Amino acid sequence: MSETATASKPSFNRKNPLIAHIPRRRFLSEGAAEKETWHLEIDLQGSELTYTPGDSLAVLSTNWPQAVENVLLALGLSGDEEVTGPDKSNAPLKSVLTKQCVITLPDKKFLNKLVEKAGDAANELAVLLDPEKKKELSNYLWGREIIDFLLMFPDLKWEAQEFVGVLKKLNVRLYSIASSLAAVPNQVHLTVASVLYNSFDKDRKGVCSTFLNERCDENTDVPCFVTPGKGFRLPEPEDDTPIIMCGPGTGIAPFRAFLQERNATKAKGDAWLFFGEIHQDTCYFYEDEWKNYLEDGTLNKITTAFSRDQDHKIYVHHRMLEEGAEIWSWLERGAIFYVCGDAERMANDVDQALHQIAIEHGGKSEQEAAAYIEQMRQDKRYRRDVY
Ligand SMILES: Cc1cc2nc3c(=O)[nH]c(=O)nc-3n(C[C@H](O)[C@H](O)[C@H](O)COP(=O)(O)OP(=O)(O)OC[C@H]3O[C@@H](n4cnc5c(N)ncnc54)[C@H](O)[C@@H]3O)c2cc1C
Ligand SMILES: NC(=O)c1ccc[n+]([C@@H]2O[C@H](COP(=O)([O-])OP(=O)(O)OC[C@H]3O[C@@H](n4cnc5c(N)ncnc54)[C@H](OP(=O)(O)O)[C@@H]3O)[C@@H](O)[C@H]2O)c1
């Protein structure tokens, strides 16, 4: 190496993840029976992993040991059988099911094999596998896991390799980073909601969210790497462009990172935060931090929507409509509008609210409002990180 060459920083990825640990955690939804959301702090000391607010952390988890045991029991296999896993390495079946395969949500390769093996007994399922029945299949599969199908056809004999061969590779899950290195050097914070639900009389757990929230202690290895947030970026600190951030639920995560960064860099522009959750007394995530930011001027305004504190739902987009005149004046000052969180319902409702505001307070027709929002998008003043 020449004298002027510098050692390149390690770049972490799926094949070469950082093995991190979570030394500190805090329950954010204490007292709320309906959800479990945690604040997690991962240590980066000595790792040289860096990130920018707006990035996400990709986490590689393992399956629940009990879920693996249940599958092995249903297959009638010991787990010691040597198999080749999706990552092409050879290992005992139990290890491959634990670390490499999706063993919860069934996909078509598994279902086709099941139908082939079960014959007439799986007729109902065979009908749904017709490519024309995509919607019906998705409805049928909602809430069903691989273990349910194995138990539905207990007499089928599976070879270990045959079973592994029809399973998908266990993929990373992304979590919006909830911290800024400018405020907390050597740390990355996450805001993670456990996916927990009951279907067909069984309690189910999302793989990665419950790995992070329930199975990790400070000694557990957490393989991870950073994925850049496509365009989900703050203006430069000296740029006085105002920003409006809308982050209900775990959608708050990147905005905590934004506000930490803006506080540390003394950013100039105005900032307005919309936050929504189910109950104010149990789920007002990071409330003290927002209070401090309001006091020191990092944040100009916070607007909240607690959906289950009254007999009718109040959501962030309802609050946006109430604040329509002021939102419109911020947009006319060139504000960037950011939204993060649920893609299925919330992001659409927020989008409609923006259109409505342009109509009511900007005096625009429906078409003009659509063009206005489209222009915001093209000018990168409407940025979405929804999932
Ligand atoms: C860019 C990005 C950023 C994200 N940021 C965050 C974040 O900051 N915090 C956060 O908590 N999450 C975040 N997510 C979501 C996260 O990546 C995972 O998708 C989430 O944690 C679930 O993963 P899991 O492995 O726990 O669940 P999985 O094992 O993947 O299970 C989820 C699946 O379970 C099924 N399911 C879920 N609920 C039900 C139900 N009620 N009935 C029937 N079936 C159901 C669905 O098929 C669903 O796809 C983000 C996602 C993206 C893409
Ligand atoms: N991929 C996954 O499996 C996965 C994992 C984690 C989270 N998520 C999803 O990501 C989203 C975030 O979950 P989360 O726990 O952070 O919070 P969330 O479920 O989005 O809830 C946050 C708040 O948003 C409210 N809300 C519901 N519908 C809304 C709408 N149309 N517009 C505005 N607000 C609305 C909720 O109210 P109510 O609940 O009272 O209606 C709640 O007060 C959810 O959709 C969740 O399902 C998905």
Image: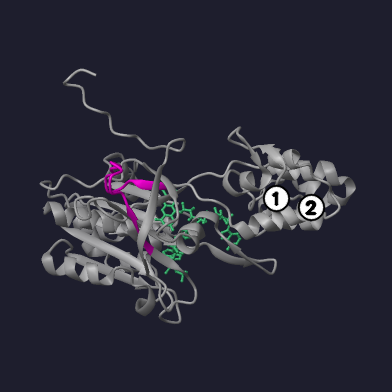
Residue extending farthest to the right is: 120
Q: Give 162 or 141, whichever is nearer the viewer.
A: 162
Residue 89: give x, y in percent of width and height. 60, 34
Residue 132: give x, y in percent of width and height. 71, 42
Q: Is residue 51 left or right of residue 206?
A: left
Quarter of the image where one finds residue 131: top right
Label of residue 137 in the image:
1
Quarter of the image where one finds residue 319: bottom left
Q: Is residue 46 magenta?
A: yes
Q: Give 362 or 81, whichever is nearer the viewer.
A: 81
SS at badge 1: helix
Residue shown at the point (15%, 61%) measured from the top left: 298
User: In which quadrant is the N terminus drawn?
Assistant: top left
Mark 1, mark 2: which one is toward the viewer? 2
Q: Main secondary structure of the magenta part?
A: loop
In the figure, 174 relative to 271: above or below? above
The residue that disc 2 covers is 76
N-term mark: 1 or 2: 2
Q: Is residue 254 magenta?
A: no
Q: State the extent of the magenta-drawn residues as a range.
A: 39-58
Q: Is residue 271 left or right of residue 277?
A: left
